Each structure stands twice: as C-alpha cells, then as structure tokens.
C-alpha cells in the first residue's frame, strides 16, 4: 500500500553534489509556504552542509508555490524533491485522530530507500533559530 502512494515526483535539483543529510516532510498543499520557511531556516543555519529535502504533499502544488521552491533550490544550491501523494491509498485508514498527511510518514521509507539509508522527518510547523556550531544539523 505505502510503496504505491506516490503518483508523481518533481525533482528540483541544484548542482547534485553528494548530500550530507536528507530531511523529509509530510504536508497538505495548503502548507507549502510554512515548509518553505522551515527549509529556508534550516539552510540559513547550516550553510556548510549539503541538504536534500523531500516534500510529501497531498495534491499538485500550485505553480506559484513550485516557483518559490525553485528559487530556494537556485539560491541555496540545494535539492528539493516533491512527491505528490495519491490519497486513495490511505482511504481505509483511520483519520479521526490523525490527518491523512500523518500517514505519509509510512510512505517515506519506501520512496527514500534507494536514495539514503537515513533521513530526518520533521513536522513542517517548526523553524530553526540557530545552529549550535559544529557539523551537526540542529
């Protein structure tokens, strides 16, 4: 079920340097702006790292929002891959306590297994304020 959840993948790539780190998000399409703010805060506070971002979203992203992600890719020389989810894969799951987007977390490992063996999942309603130093991602 979860391995077939992605109906379309949009790869927005910078210069394709080897990534130091992969970060994944599961959002609804109404949350593209906040996840863009979070990505910006992560990149601003980790300029010495090559980070790839994987956004799992419930529908096609509007062109205006897609262009904002393209600007991030170009400005920060990063990679953002957008995975458009087919919610029909999740229709039989209980959505009383969780949003359907919460179930995207189960699809992420299937999509990233050939890309990386480790990734960080972050809820998109956060912001990174400051890197504590060193090479570690905060």
Image (cartoon, grey):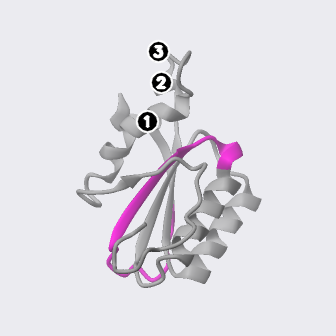
Relative to 93, 106 lies left or right: left
Relative to 54, 34 lies left or right: right
Asked whether 35 or 62 is in front, the reply is: 35
Q: Which residue is tagged 2?
A: 90
Is label 2 in contact with label 3 (beta carbons under 8 Å)? yes
Farthest left residue in view: 117
Q: Which residue is tagged 1?
A: 5
Classify 56 as above or below 14: above
Asked whether 59 or 43 is in front, the reply is: 43
Asked whether 112 or 45 is in front, the reply is: 45
Classify 8 as above or below 76: above
What's the CA distance linking mark 2 and mark 3? 6 Å
Q: Which quadrant of the figure contains the N terminus?
A: top left
Task: Name the image quarter holding residue 137.
Answer: bottom left
Farthest right residue in view: 64
What's the CA distance linking mark 1 and mark 2? 8 Å
Mark 2 residue element? helix
How busy is the neighbourhood of tag 3: few (under 14 within 10 Å), some, or many (20 plus)? few
First of labels 1, 2 by sequence position: 1
The answer to if 28 sits in the magenta stretch is yes
Is label 1 in contact with label 2 (beta carbons under 8 Å)? yes
First of labels 3, 1 by sequence position: 1
Q: Which residue is tagged 3?
A: 92
Which residues make up the magenta segment?
A: 11-31
């Amino acid at each position: 079920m979860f391995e077939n959840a992605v109906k379309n993948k949009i790869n927005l790539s910078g210069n394709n340097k080897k990534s130091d780190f992969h970060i994944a998000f599961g959002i609804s399409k109404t949350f593209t702006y906040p996840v863009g703010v979070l990505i910006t805060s992560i990149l601003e506070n980790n300029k010495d790292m090559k980070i790839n971002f994987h956004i799992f979203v419930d529908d096609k992203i509007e062109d205006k929002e897609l262009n904002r992600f393209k600007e991030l890719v170009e400005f920060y020389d990063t990679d953002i891959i957008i995975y458009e989810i087919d919610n029909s894969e999740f229709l039989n799951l209980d959505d009383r306590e969780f949003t359907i987007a919460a179930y995207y977390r189960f699809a992420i490992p299937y999509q990233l297994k050939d890309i990386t063996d480790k990734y960080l999942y972050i809820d998109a309603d956060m912001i990174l304020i400051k890197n504590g130093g060193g090479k570690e991602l905060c």
